Image (cartoon, grey):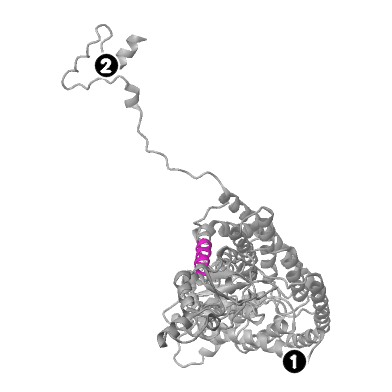
Amino acid sequence: MKVAVQAESGLTAKTGAPKPPAPRGQAAPHPNRMMLLRPRLPALPNIRKPNGSFRLVGLAIVIGILTGLMVAVVQQFVVFAQRAMLGFAAERRIALPDHASFLRIALALACSAFLVTLLSHLIARWKTKDPIDAVEANALNGGRMGWSDATGVVIPILASVCFGASVGIEAAVTQLGAVLASRLGRRLGRPRSDLRLLVAVGAAAAIAAAYRAPIAGMLYAYELLLGTFSRRTLAPIGLGAIAAVMTIWLLLGQARPFSLETGPGTSWSDYPLAVLIGVVAAFAGIAVMLLVSAIERLLKRFMKNEVLRRLSAALLLTALATRFPAVLGSGHAAIEHAVSGDIAGRHALGLLAAKGLASAASLGAGFRGGLFGASLMIGALLGQVMAWILAFIPGAPEWSPALCAVIGMASVGASVIGSPLAMIFLVLETTGDFDATIVVAIGALTASFLTDRLFGYSFATWRFQQRGLAIEGGHDVSRLEATAISEIIKPPKRAVMANGSLEEVRRALSTAGARGTAVYAVDGTFLGLIDPRLVEAIEAESADLPVVAAELVYESGPIVTPAASLAEVLDIFRSDDRATLAVVGFEDRNKIVGCIRARDAFALASSLLDAQRREDLGGGSWK
C-alpha cells in the first residue's frame, strides 16, 4: 500500500528518489492516464424541474378538448332544433324550402319570445346578480365564473337562435368554454393570474372550434380576454385552441362553416379599395351598434312588457324573412354565398339592410345572442354592395367582388367585435390566400382605427358602458378594487386641540409632515386634519392673524371608512389635491381610525400593478 502511494506521488518504489525526466520529444507519463483520456464536457445548464407550468399547459389541452366537444354538440343541436322549429336549418340555408312556411316561422319566433322571457325571469329569481361573461369576469372578477353564469347566458341564447332569432351562437360557446376553464382552475386551486389565463384558453378554444381557425381563436383571446400578449400565455392558449380544432375535426370533419375563395391575385388598385371599404365598414359597424341601443330605448319607451317587445321583434323578423329568409339565425350560410357572388347587386343591398335591422331588432327587443356571425355576414354583403356600386364608376379598375366581400367581412367584424387581428387571421385560415390577407388587413385595421377614434367601443364594451361598467376589455382592473386599505392606515402623527394657536399648529406640522395632524374638540370629538395649504396661505399674509386650529382643517370632503377599497382612495386623491385622508369609524363618523397618505396609496397601487404585470408577462413563478 505504501509503494502504491509513493508511485502515485511521483517517487521510485525502491529508493523514494524522484523519477528521471522523460526523454526530449516524449511527453512525460502521467500517473493518471485515464483522467487525460476523458473528454471535458461543458457544464450542463440548470434545467428547471417540472413544475406548475407543465400542469397548466396540460390543463389547457384538456380544456381545449372538452370545449371542442361542447362546440360540436351545440352546433349540431342548433341545426336539429332549427329544423324542428322552423322546418329548415337557418344556419345552413339562405332560401326557404318548399315544406317550410312563414306561419311556422312566426309561431316559432313567438314561442321564442315567451320562452326567453320565462327563462329570464326564472334565472333572475334563481340568481340575484346578472350572469357575467368571460370579458367581464377577467376584468372585474379575476377569472372567477360559475355554472350559474353559463346557465344564465347559454340557455336564453339557445332559446333565441334555435327558434330563428337573428343572433349568433358564438357568445354561448365562448361562455361554455370560459366557465369550464374557470371551474377547473378553481377546483385545482390555481392562482388569480392562472384563472384569467384559463378563461382566455376556454374562449380561444370555443372560437377556434366554431370556425376551425386556431390562430383566430388565439388572437381573439389576446385582444378581448387578456388585453396583452406574453410568452408565458402562448403555449396554453395556442395548444388549447389547436386541441379544440382537432377535436371537432374528429367529430364533425374538417369542413368549415363557410369556404371562401377570393378569386384572382391582388393588384395595386386593391390597396386604396381596402382603405375605402374599411372606412365604410367602420361607419356601418357603428351604425349597427347604435341601432341596437336605439331600438332598445324605443321599445322600452312604448312597450313596458318584455313579452310584447319580443313579440314585436318576432313580427318584424317574420316580415323580413318573407323577402330575405337569410336574416334568420346567425347568417353563416349567407357569408359563403355573398363571397362567391350568388348574392350580389340589389339583392345584396336589400339583404344587407334587412340583416342589420333584424339583428338590431332581435338584440334590442331582448332576444339573447351576439353579433359575431351577424357582423361577418353584414361585412360580406357590404363588400359585395361596394363592388357593385364601384363598377358604375367610369374608368375604375376591375375589382374582384369576392375580394371586396372578404375585406368587408373582416372590416365590419373588426369594428363590431373589436378584434382586428382575429378577423385578419380568420380570413387567412379560411381562404389560405396570403396576398388577399394583406389587403384584408388594411381594411380591418382602418375600420378598427376609425371605430376607436369616432366611437370608442366595440359592441361588447358598448353594452358594458350602458350597464354602467367602465370596462374596455379583459384587462384586470379589479385588483385595486379588491385590495383593502388596512395596511396603509396609520395613526396621525400629531394632534392639537380645537382652540390651539397658530404657533401650536406650526410646531405640529413641522414634525407631523404628511402623516397628518388631527384636531380634536374639548369632548374628544374628531374635527378633521390640518390643511397645510391654509397654514401656508395665512403665513404668507400675516403671522399674527387670530386663528385657531379648528379653522385650519380640510373642508368637508369624501368620507373614508376602513371598508373602502384602494381604488376608491386613489380616485379621491386624483380628484382632490390633498396629501392625507382621514379614515373614520363605520358607525361613529366623529371618531378617527387613522390616516392614509397619498404617497402610501400610490406606492401600494404601483406594487400591485407591477406584480400583475410580472404575472402577465411570466416573470412570476407558475405554481
Neighbour tally class for label 2: few under 14, some 14-19, many 20 plus, Cα within 10 Å: some
Secondary structure mostly seen in the magenta stretch: helix
Please name the residue shown 57% across and 79% down the image.
498
**Residue 154 image offset from top left, x and y in percent:** 74, 69
* Of 15 and 112, the residue lying toward us: 15
Q: Is residue 67 above or below residue 420?
A: above
Nearer to us of marks 1 and 2 is 2
Q: Which residues are magenta?
A: 601-613
Q: Secondary structure at mark 2?
A: loop
User: Disc 2 designates what residue?
Assistant: 10
Q: Residue 457, located in which quarter of the rendered image?
A: bottom right
Residue situated in front as seen by the camera: 51 or 522: 522
Q: Give me the C-alpha separation between circle 1 and circle 2.
A: 107 Å
Among all residues in the image, which is located at the extreme top? 14
Q: Which residue is mark 1?
A: 301
Q: Nearer the viewer, residue 73 or 42?
A: 42
Determine the secondary structure under disc 1: helix
Is residue 612 rendered magenta in the image?
A: yes
Q: Position of residue 487 (x, y in %)?
A: 57, 63
